[in-house]
Image (cartoon, rainbow, N blue to C red):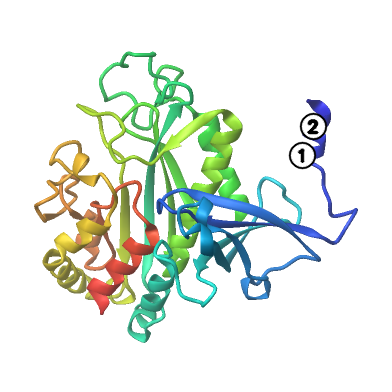
Amino acid sequence: MALLNDLINLDLTDATNKIIAEYIWIGGSGMDLRSKARTLTGPVDDPKKLPKWNYDGSSTGQAPGEDSEVILYPQAIFKDPFRRGNNILVMCDAYTPAGEPIPTNKRCAAAKIFSDPKVEKEVPWYGIEQEYTLLQKEVNWPLGWPLGGFPGPQGPYYCGIGADKAFGRDIVDAHYKACLYAGINISGINGEVMPGQWEFQVGPSVGISAGDEVWVARYILERITEISGVVVSFDPKPIPGDWNGAGAHTNYSTKSMREDGGYEVILKAIEKLSHKHKEHIAAYGEGNERRLTGRHETADINTFLWGVANRGASIRVGRDTEKDGKGYFEDRRPASNMDPYVVTSMIAETTIL
C-alpha cells in the first residue's frame, strides 16, 4: 500500500511536460457526474485551447446505441487536487455531433442568459449554500446513526463538535481544502441541523461561474467520499419525519441592489419572483415537495412568502440589508439536488429580463 500511495502521489513535473486533464460532465439523470482523463502535451490555462472530446452517450442515458456519440465542449478549468502538479479538472457541457446542446445540457441556455447585455450590466452575484448528507455505504443510512435506529433529536448537531454530534468532519475538511486548492470560490463549511448532514458555500461568484464552481465542488466531494468509502446524497429529504431536509439556498444580488437605493430594487425583484413561483418551483429540484412542507425552516411549496430574517419564508432578506438599504436576498426554495445552471440563470432572467 505504501508503494501504491507513492505512485498515486507521484509528481510528474520533473519527468515530463505532459499533463492529465480530467474531463467532467453531467450524465443522463441530470445529477450524476461522469469523468474521464486524457493526456495533453503541456499545461493549459484557457478552456478554449483544450480539444473537444466525445463519449458514449448510450452508456449514460443520453443517446441511442445506433447514434451514441456525444461531444464534450470544455468550458472551465480548475486545478486538480487529486493529481496535483499542472494537472487539471475540466468542466464540460455536452452537444450532438451537429452542435446542438443535448437535453441535459442546461449550461448552454444559462450562458445565453448571462451573456445578455442587460444581465452583464447588472453583474449578478451568487452565493450558494449546498447542503448534503453523508451515508454509510452498505446500509444507505446517515453517517453516525445507529444501524436501524435513530440518534437523539435535532438540536445539538448544528455546527456541533464532538464524536457524538459531528460525523464525517475529516471528509468535510478534506473537501474544503481541495476546493480551495482547485480555485473554487468556496467561502465556508458547517455542520447542519440533521446529524450526518453538512453544508458548503460557494461564492460570491459571478454569473455562469457559480454553476461551474458548484458542479466541480460536487465532483470533488463525490471523489473524496469515494476514497473514504462513504456515499454522498443530495436528496432533499433523505430521512422522512421530524428531520431537516437538504436545500441549496441561493443568495443573490445585482449591481443595482448593492448600490444606494438597492432595497427598492430588491423589493421589485421579489415581487417579480412571486409572479413566477410555480415556474421556479418546477425547476428547483426533484422531490422538493418532500422538503418544502412549511416545517423545518421552509415555506410551504404552494405558498410564496418573503420576510426579513425569516427562515420559514420562500425569500429571506437579511437584517443588514434592511438596515443598510442595499445588499442581497436569499432564495430558500431550491433543493439540494437542483441544477445550479438552471437556478442561477432563472433568477437572473426573472429579476432582470
Is residue 331 shown left or right of residue 147? left
The residue positioned 81% from the left and 27% from the top of the image is: 2
Report the amino acid beneath label 1. Ile
**Mark 1 Cα-neighbour bin, 10 Å: few <14, some 14–19, many ≥20:** few
Is residue 80 shown left or right of residue 106? right
**Mark 2 Cα-neighbour bin, 10 Å: few <14, some 14–19, many ≥20:** few
Report the amino acid beneath label 2. Leu
Q: In which quarter of the image is the C terminus?
A: bottom left
Q: In x, y percent, where is residue 151?
A: 32, 16
Q: Name the residue under label 1.
A: 8
Tell me, yes or no, if residue 185 can be seen here: no
Is residue 49 shown left or right of residue 249? right
Q: What element carries label 2?
A: helix
Instruction: State which quadrant residue 18 falls in.
Output: bottom right
The residue positioned 54% from the left and 65% from the top of the image is: 70
Instruction: State which quadrant residue 71 falls in.
Output: bottom right
Is residue 245 shown above or below 120? above
Q: Residue 4 carries which label?
A: 2
Instruction: State which quadrant residue 104 falls in.
Output: bottom left
For the residue pair 245 and 68, the one nearer the viewer reads as 68
Q: In x, y percent, where is residue 341?
A: 39, 63
Q: What element carries label 1?
A: helix
Q: Quadrant of the N terminus?
A: top right
The residue positioned 34% from the left and 75% from the top of the image is: 255
Q: In x, y percent, where is residue 140?
A: 41, 26
Q: State yes or no: discs 2 and 1 in contact (Cβ < 8 Å).
A: yes
Q: In x, y percent, where is residue 143?
A: 43, 24
Is residue 230 shown above or below 334? above
Is residue 330 shown above or below 32? below
Cα distance, mark 2 to mark 1?
Answer: 6 Å
Is residue 341 shown left or right of residue 281? right
Residue at the bottom extreme?
A: 117
